[in-house]
Image (cartoon, rainbow, N blue to C red):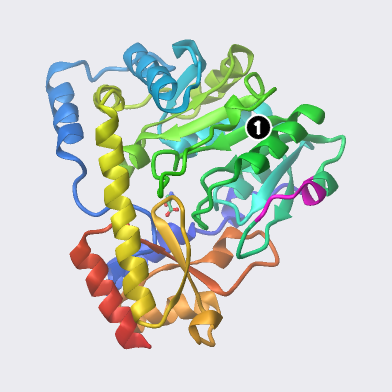
Amino acid sequence: GHPVYRDMPTTIFEHMSARARETGAINLGQGFPEGPGPRAVLQAAAEALLTKSSQYPPMAGLPELRSAIADHYARHQQCDLSPQEVIVTSGATEAIAASLLALVKPGDEVLMLAPLYDAYLPLVERVGGVAKVVTLTPPDWRVTREALSAAITPRTRILLMNNPVNPTGIVLRAAELALLADLCVAHDLIAICDEVWEQTVYDGIPHRPLIAFPGMRDRTVKIGSAGKIFSVTGWKVGWMCAAPPIATLLARAHQFLTFTTPPGLQWAVAEGLAYPDAWFSEQRAAYQASRDRLAAGLAAAGYVVQPSAATWFLSIDLPASGIALDDVAFCNRIIDEAGVAAIPISAFYPADPVTHLVRLCFSKTNQTLDQAIARLSAFR
Ligand code: GLN
């Protein structure tokens, strides 16, 4: 039968964070920025809590936030969404769950790419979907027509994907996105596109939303996260955007999951999304500098680092670094012996995992990064 919740493991992120709390290790595992978050955003939330209603806001979100999200996407990604096409959720994880609940019927096949974010598979299975996972190959993780076509059947209904990609830090190329769009149109699939890393793309690379590709406007759910954009992961403010026929279904799922999201935080996010472009490029530049600092420090310590074009993560390649441990063994060793928590990439696979890569989170202060580098250097 059907998988049930009691069979599910605790997520690798909670597991490693709990171990980091117990052992006092530097936590480069779960992805979250160090510190309280940007002052202006926190101030906006404090102000809103003191001056605005804390009672239930409208189910689909504050109109002001829905407009701010649509405007933000028009300005940053040339998307033409209307506020009615935006539904505010309690984090992107809720948006993923609501999308699957709304759109998957038992027996529908859901196409996914591995490595895949750890919430996808348990949710797909719990709503009765049948996972069809296409495994990508390092170091390029290229998406090819052959592999995807082989996985699509007449029962395939949904493509569930992430771009930029956690954990690899890959940004899908325009041609790969065009191919995915092409397949969605040809096979009449709805794409649920988790774009929570859209504002953390480095080296001048643009973020290309799948919804903007030909034929995708009316068949894409675009998911975003204020936690990622504003470095406040605990706020759990996210959203899902889709054309009205799909948005109506999404709203029905959302109403029985969380119904609404704290209004003070919604006001603050609405204000933040309207910040000038320079604010977002400064954030990006700061994260890019942190990425480069951790990469350079690890390289100087003899680790081989996989390039990361986006997200808050980079990976180290164990065998290339001369380390004869698999990713889980290495993570267990460094948390106890070096005092650094990390995430094994094998946690992002339902089967046949890649076991030679370890993910490290770089959205930390220079001091923390330097300390982690020193510890990992001494561990060698
Ligand atoms: N997205 C975060 C990560 O990849 C984890 C979020 C969570 O723990 N739910 O580290």
Residue in view at x 55 percent, y 79 percent:
326
Foreground of the two, 116 or 186: 186
Quarter of image, res 348: bottom right
Depth order, front residue of 259/154: 154
Dot 1, how many residues are within 10 Å of its Cα: few (below 14), some (14-19), or many (20+)? many
The residue range painted magenta reads 142-148
Say which quadrant the C terminus sits in.
bottom left
What percent of the width, then of the height, locates residue 48? 17, 22
Q: Residue furthest front?
A: 204
- Apparent side of residue 215 relative to residue 267 in the rendered image (left or right): right
Task: Look at 55% across and 48% down and name the residue there.
Answer: 119
Is residue 24 visible to us here? no
Q: Quadrant of residue 276?
A: top left
Q: Quadrant of residue 62?
A: top left
Per the image, label 1 sits on a secondary structure element best described as: strand
The image shows residue 351 at horizontal and vertical percentages of 69, 63
The residue to which callout 1 is attached is: 191
Q: Position of residue 140 (x, y in %)?
A: 62, 60
Q: Is residue 162 magenta?
A: no
Residue 127 as seen in the image, left or right of residue 282: right
Q: Foreground residue, 282 or 210?
A: 282
**Above or below 222: residue 300:** below
Residue type for callout 1: Ala
